[in-house]
Structure formats: C-alpha cells, structure tokens
Image (cartoon, grey):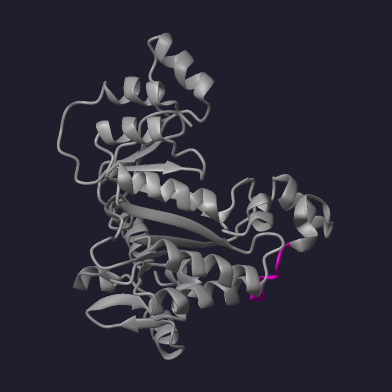
Amino acid sequence: MLSAEQFAALTAKLPAREWAEATIEAAPGDADAPRIRAWTQAGIDRASLGVQSFVPEVARAAGRRHGPQTVRADIARLRRRGIRNIAVDLIAGLAHQTRRTWEESLSWVDRLAVDHVSVYMLEVDDKSRLGKELRAGGSRYGAGAVPGGERIVEFYLRAVERLAELGFERYEVSNFARAGKRSRHNLKYWRMEPYFGCGSDAHSFDGERRWANVETAGEYVSRIRGGLSPRKPLERLDERRLLEERILTGLRTADGVALTAGERKLLAPERTASFASGRLLVAGRTLRLSDEGFLFADAVAGELLT
C-alpha cells in the first residue's frame, strides 16, 4: 500500500546487508512500475500476490476487485524488473465459489507458471460481520453463498492433487512450492527459529521469549514519539511450552518434527498409537502427519502431549 516514495524512504533506514530472501506482499493491481522499481532497489527478490481467486465475482467476496488479467499484468511487470520468484495466495471456501470456479483458479496457476502457491481454507472471525451472519444462519455479506465445510475440504484436497500434477510439493499444510522455491522466511516460523517484527502489531521470538508490539498504528507512533517502548510484556516459554509449540509448528510441515528420547517420553503413547493406527500420523524417527492427517494438524498436535 505504500507509494514508491514512501517505501524508498522507509527501507533507506535499514542497515545495508545481503538478504537471504526479501518478500513483498501486495494485492493484485498494486504492483505498478514505480513501486516495483522501489522494491527491487531495496533488495526485494520475491513477491507474494493476495489473489484469493482468479474469478472476478468470487474475488469480490474477498474484497478484491481484480480479474485474472490484472494478475497476469502484475506478474509480467515483476518479471521484467527482475523479481522472478513469485507466489500467489488462494482461499478455498469463499462466497459463490463452486467446483468450476475453483478449477478455473487452479488452471491460472498453471498458465502463469508461478513458483509458490498458498491454499488457505476459509476461516471466519466470529466477531466479523460475515462471522456473525454465518452464526445466525443469515444471508447478508455473502454468508448464504459460502460453501459448507465438506465442500471446502473437497476444494483443498483437489488443490493438493492438481498442484502435485503441476510439479508443486506440499511442504506445509497450506503451502506448495516448486523445487528450490520454498518460502525461507515462512520456514523460520515452523522451525521455531528466531525472528524480529517491526511496526504495530508485529510479533517477535528469540528462541525462548515471545513479545508483540501494540496493535494500532496510532498507539505505536504515539508511544515512540513519547519516548516509550511500543512493546507489550514479554512471555518467556518454559521447556514444556517450547516443546508444545515445536510439535504444533513442526507437524504442519511435510518434514515433521524430530524429537529427542527425552521429549518422546512426554508424548501420550496411547494417543500416538491411536493416531498412527488411524493413519493420521507416521511415527518413526521423525514424527509427521500423513496426507489425511494434514486435515487435522492442529487437533492431532494438541492431543499428543501427556
């Protein structure tokens, strides 16, 4: 959303360094030539477009106003300017989505030859207008046109199948990449590696502690201008909590999570055996989910510890 000038002014304050990977997220239609020029000058080498759907009437349900040609034009400009590692996001379960429109979105992934696709199953905040309407059984805000849970799962499984046919590897529950194109910054979170977040509502983790900044931009700026820290209180994670989170994040990946002998003793053996016999979990030297188990990743992880 930043103009080219705003982005250049902001990134000029960053210390000079060699980026391992630098990603910009943008809505389709925002990747114009001046912005892309500012992005590349700052060292951006990867772009992620929040497409959600390539079908205009479905995209509108997600607050987007683009069509597939908008995305095609953005990707062409990005590639001309040297940003060739490109990702798109899709959401399964948007209002007015059908088998036909879902197949249409998946076909555009093939046509545009992107390197990375994120497929998220629709999650609605109960406090949002759509969430309240769905809970009340109403039809406003597109609630009456939102597919049911079984259809959303069907869309997700079809994406897994189609993307595999196109040469994508599912390396995390919602993320698919061509060889060598896994998102490096996302992998940090799932591997519980340290990360630092800047700005309002940004989160950070140093390996033992978590913290977040205040949520609104206004309060963030006000605190800094007043000489106060924008950081909320730190949360120190004990050994058990670190293990819980490592299992929760690690099981979301295709690689799974490797546990020490001591850590394995903290698992509930009867639940581990039950999930394994139910073909949701593969319990070897590394603990990982089966293809079916990916649908229940958080539930399985939450039940494994004694």
- The stretch drawn in magenta includes residue 147: yes
The answer to which quarter of the image holds residue 178 is bottom left
In the drawing, does residue 125 fall left or right of residue 115?
right
The image quadrant where one finds the C terminus is bottom left
- Identified at 38% across, 63% down, the residue is 113
Question: In x, y percent, where is residue 69?
Answer: 53, 53
In the drawing, does residue 303 fall left or right of residue 282?
right
Question: In x, y percent, where is residue 239?
Answer: 28, 54
In the drawing, does residue 15 fall left or right of residue 203?
left
- Identified at 41% across, 72% down, the residue is 304
User: Is any atom of residue 186 visible in this view?
Assistant: yes
User: Is any atom of residue 42 visible in this view?
Assistant: no
> In this orientation, which residue lies closer to the viewer: 242 or 168?
168
- Identified at 25% across, 68% down, the residue is 179
Tally of marks: 0
The answer to which quarter of the image holds residue 102 is bottom right
- The stretch drawn in magenta includes residue 59: no
Q: Looking at the image, is 88 positioned above or below residue 289?
A: above
- Identified at 20% across, 69% down, the residue is 260
Q: Looking at the image, is 241 positioned above or below residue 153?
A: above
Question: In x, y percent, where is residue 222?
Answer: 48, 14
Question: In x, y percent, where is residue 149?
Answer: 66, 71
Q: Looking at the image, is 235 positioned above or below residue 258?
A: above
Q: Which residues are magenta?
A: 146-151
* Identity of the residue furthest to the bottom in this view: 277
